[in-house]
Image (spheres, grey):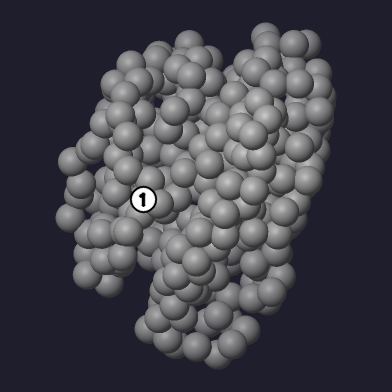
Amino acid sequence: MPAFSQSTTTTHTSALVPPALSLPVIETEFPRQLHPYWPELQGKTRAWLLEKRLMSADKVEAYADGLCYTDLMAGYYIGAPDEVLQAIADYSAWFFVWDDRHDRDVIHGRPQAWELLRLRLHTALDSPREHLHHQDPLVAGFADSVLRLYSFLGEGWNARFAAHFHDVIEAYDREFHNRTSGIVPTVEEYLELRRMTFAHWIWLDLLEPSAEYELPDIVRENSDYQRAALLCQDFAAWYNDLCSLPKEIAGDEVHNLGISLIHHEGMRLEEAVKEVRRRVEECITEFLDVEQKVLRYAERIDNGSVRGAELATAVRTCLFNMRNWFSSVYWFHHESGRYMVDSWDDRSTPPYVNNEAAGEK
């Protein structure tokens, strides 16, 4: 049985899942959650994308809701205060737009544009207030979302988040050079890089403002807590690889677990798909085991003191939302237009992207 009940959250209509991508254990053991703020969240993030000029009005109108970016976050950070969830959702939407810019800079051979953006993002991360009106909407939007995220917890959390995202920017730079050089990373190299480009630590950091509690190092570094955290993110990254493999093969990508298995392990496509699926299923099985260990750890923390009770509650809340990441990611991949490659006019060019770099004509 799941460790948590439905609570007071809103459920959501589920899409049909292709048999090859179906994971019955997710559908039965991980009840889907949706934050009750979601309808308002969707509208406000749509307005934010327009206000910050991150997507054109016609693309927002045609694609923003169908991309389901807010659904993903509203299915993960259950219990977050509305303003926290709104900041996370806007940041997440920005992240997808940034990912698309990075992809277009690779596809169109724009190393100078990418290098300029990389340096600007590093700077904006350390001084977001000074970049709120930057000429590049991607930099200004990033500064706005980061500044809001920095307002919820203390300086320690802010410094940790910044350090983690500096690493993400550098990982995107390594991916840029791999793709422009045609380098397919080995499986081990890919798995290490993927934890950075998927921003594992960022989404885990954001569990804390959602729980309104900054976890001490001793909790975050607890082996069971950390294992549960990594499993929910590895599941998400590898299931994404499984679902996006057709899109990424069509786009001549080199960063996908399936592609690394084919290139370096000599697997056929069917074998690689089977192996990625096996790893995905192992994440689920192991999480169900370690989840119980984290719950027992929370019981030990709850030692009768006020601080112990508050910390234990925060740990349980974070664990609950790690669990929610499985169902939220699963359904997102079958509802978002981001993965409906067969409906695109050009399988290598998503219809919702802007092919121009900032300042480019």
Residue 176: give x, y in percent of width and height: 68, 53
**Residue sitting nearer the eye, 223 or 257:** 223
Count of marks overlaid on the render: 1
Q: Is residue 255 above or below residue 86?
A: below
- Residue in the picture at 25% in, 59% down: 28
Q: Quadrant of residue 337?
A: top left
Q: Quadrant of residue 157?
A: top right
Quarter of the picture holding the N terminus: bottom left
Residue 200: give x, y in percent of width and height: 62, 49
The kind of secondary structure element at disc 1 is helix
Residue type, label 1: Ser
Instruction: Answer left or right for 277 relative to 204.
Output: left
- Residue in the picture at 62% in, 29% down: 310
* Residue carrying label 1: 327
Instruction: Answer left or right for 320 relative to 298.
Output: left
**Residue sitting nearer the eye, 329 or 252:** 329
**Residue sitting nearer the eye, 147 or 118:** 147
